Amino acid sequence: MIAMLCWIVGCFGLAIAAVHLAHQWKQLVRGARPAPWMHVVLVTENDERHIEWVIRAYSWFAWLKGRKLHFTFVDSGSTDATFPIASRVMSGYDMSWNLLVIQRNELEATLQGLKQQAAAETLIVIEPRSTEDWRKIPFKARSAL
């Protein structure tokens, strides 16, 4: 019985040592640089059915990848509860976000401006109305991520 207890304590000790070594290795590789950012631009218009799922999927994906996450919601005239749902979900996670309300004809110029600002970070643009953009969402069948 004592031998079994020593075996279990020894396994836990090895696991703790492995976690500390992995953390030290990550710090050596990354150096003093902060964690990289992932910037998700979500173009919305009456997307209350999808918004919570997309936010939760990307928050888990960023957490697993060890990245900080920033959401930009570009709205072109939502009349449903898209943003009350988004603000409720975002309050439960430690990530930054902002909202841009634009007209439909300003969408391309706004997206181009966001792409120019996000030179040093990963920028992902999702338009839920586009079927090919659904492949950019993690944890979905046939996802490209």
Image (cartoon, rainbow, N blue to C red):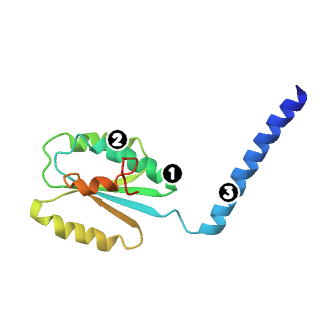
Name the quarter where the N terminus is drawn.
top right
Mark 2 or mark 3, whichever is nearer to me = 3
Q: Provide the secondary structure element on which disc 2 rests.
A: helix
Distance CA(mark 2)–CA(mark 3): 32 Å
Residue corresponding to mark 2: 89
Q: Quadrant of residue 91?
A: top left
Q: Is residue 122 visible?
A: yes
Residue at 41% x, 57% y: name it: 145
Q: Provide the secondary structure element on which disc 1 rests.
A: helix
Side of 97 relative to 21 (left or right): left
Residue corresponding to mark 1: 64
Residue at 23% x, 67% y: name it: 111
Instruction: Please provide percent x and percent y for residue 76.
Output: 14, 55
Instruction: Please provide percent x and percent y for residue 3.
Output: 89, 31
Q: Provide the secondary structure element on which disc 3 rests.
A: helix
- Kindly identify the amino acid type of the residue bearing the numbered disc 3: Ala
Decide: few, some or many residues near mark 2? Use Cα within 10 Å; few <14, some 14-19, many ≥20.
Answer: some
Q: Is residue 73 visible?
A: no
- Kindly identify the amino acid type of the residue bearing the numbered disc 2: Val
Residue corresponding to mark 3: 22
Distance CA(mark 1)–CA(mark 2): 19 Å
